[in-house]
Structure formats: C-alpha cells, structure tokens
Amino acid sequence: MVYVLFVVGFAILIKGADMLVVGASSIGKRLNMPSIVIGLTIVSFGTSLPELLVNIFASFSGSSELAIGNVLGSNVANILLILGISAMITPLPINKNTYFSEVPFSLIATLLVGFLANVTLFNQVAPNAPQYISRYDGGILLFFFLMFLGYVYVVSKQNDEDLQGSNIRVMSTGMSTLYILVGTIGLYFGGNWVVDGAINIALHFGMSESLVGLTIVAIGTSLPELVTSVIAAYRNNTDIAVGNAVGSN
C-alpha cells in the first residue's frame, strides 16, 4: 500500500503544481501583472514546486538526508538526463547568455552548497564537528537566488522576452481560486505521500535515505522539467529546452 501511495503521490504532486501555477497565473493576469513578472515568479517556480515541497516535508519529518539527496539528484537529472534526452531528439544550440552566465550560475550554486556543507573542514577548533547547512547558510543561498532572479529579469527586459508569460490561460476568478485550492491540497498530500513512501522504501531495501533521494525521488520530482524540455525539443524550441534544464538547477 505504501508503494501505491508513493507512485500516486508523485502524480498528485506534479498535477497539483500544474494546477497551482495555472490558477495563480490566471489571477496574476486578471490583476494586470506584467507577463515578465508572472513568468519570472509563478511559471518559473512551478516546475520546481515538487522538489521544494518534498524537501520541506522531508525537513519537517527529520529526513535531512532525503532532502539533500533530492536536491543533488535533481541537479544531476536536470543536466544529464533531461539535456541528454532533449539532445537525442534534436541538436541543442547554446546561446551566449546561457554559456557565459546561466551555466556559471549553476556551477557556482553547486559549489556554494558543497562549500557550506563542508565548512567544518576549515574549522580548526572543532574539525570533527557534524556537517550541516545552517539557517544562516540558507539565507546566503536565498540571497544568491535573488541575485539570479534579478539577472534573469534584466536579461529578459533587454531581449524583450516575456518568460513564457504571454501564453497564460485566463479563467474566471472562481475557477482560478478553485485551481489554486485543489493544487495546494494536491501538493500537500502528494508531498507527504512521496516522503513517507521514500522513507519506507529506504527501510525495506536497506538503502540510505540520501540514496533514495538521489535516485527515485530526484527523478520523480524532475518529471515536470523533463516533460517541458522534451516537448520543447520536439517542437524545436531549443532555447526553452536548454533554459528550463539549466534554470531549474
């Protein structure tokens, strides 16, 4: 039964994220928010909601190894799996902004997490202290994330891009609210079931939670990015295919 809930949880989690994004984007359009702002916030965050919710629930349940494994595994899946499959469908040209700015941002983010997690290596007072990412470290990571959002906003304005915000479906206020509520409920239950299932899988097969997070959970929560990039590559929208995979890191 646990494994059924695990699989169903993934489906509900991904669908919940999609419904929340559709509803929130519709509300944003009705409030006359600029397309670039909607794209930069609601739409861009949408495909990362499964990872975010799984990590939040894992953290609250004390499964920090699962949360860290999911983050690292999702990064690997985004670059190797998603770009690999997309490139098999069609060659992916890389523009200058991606090569000189977005890829370095992704590398810096990965290195920063590694540095913060291993900062005790440089601690001469307590060299054997436990390694962890503190609340202060979390603040540093969020600061760099805001810097990245600022960069994306500036580049998009310069290139007159709308960050996928012009294709937003506008619904009635009642329907938009319903989508948001149903999506939020789906995220809550789906996220809980995925975390519970992952912990039980780890216990049943004698695997560490970090290994489950690096593999099963990471690939599952990366499905929205995978579907988006594969469809974009199939339609020859290579910039979206590459940007989605790199930006999600």
Image (cartoon, grey):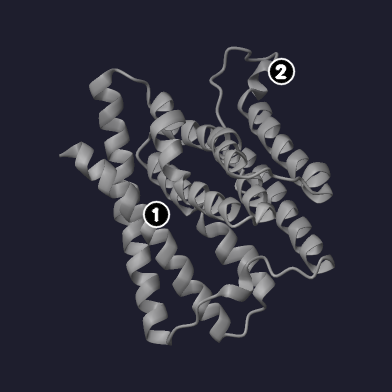
- The amino acid on which the numbered mark 2 sits, given as a three-letter code, is Phe
Look at the image and tell me in which quarter the C terminus lies.
Answer: top right
Closer to the camera, 195 or 133?
195
- SS for tag 1? helix
Closer to the camera, 201 or 139?
201
> Which residue does the image show at 80% across and 42% down from the upper left?
99
Visible in this render: residue 236?
yes
Looking at the image, residue 68 sits to the left or right of residue 179; the answer is: right
**Residue highlighted by disc 1:** 14
Q: Residues within 10 Å of mark 1 (few under 14, many from 20)?
A: many
Q: Is residue 213 above or below residue 231?
A: above
Q: CA distance from mark 2 to mark 1?
A: 40 Å
Residue 134 placed where, x, y %? 57, 36
Closer to the camera, 61 or 75?
75
Q: Residues within 10 Å of mark 2 (few under 14, many from 20)?
A: few
Closer to the camera, 12 or 92?
92
Residue 19 placed where, x, y %? 40, 67
> Which residue does the image show at 58% across and 33% down from the upper left?
80
Q: Is residue 204 above or below residue 196?
A: above
Which quadrant would residue 104 be assigned to in this image? top right
Q: Nearer the viewer, mark 2 or mark 1?
A: 1
- The amino acid on which the numbered mark 1 sits, given as a three-letter code, is Ile
> Which residue does the image show at 69% across and 44% down from the upper left?
92
**Residue highlighted by disc 2:** 122
> Which residue does the image show at 39% across and 54% down from the upper left?
14
Q: How many marks?
A: 2
Looking at the image, residue 229 sits to the left or right of residue 192; the answer is: right
- SS for tag 2? helix
| Labels 2 and 1: the sequence-earlier one | 1
Which quadrant would residue 185 be assigned to in this image? bottom left
Look at the image and tell me in which quarter the N terminus lies.
Answer: top left
Residue 55 placed where, x, y %? 45, 43
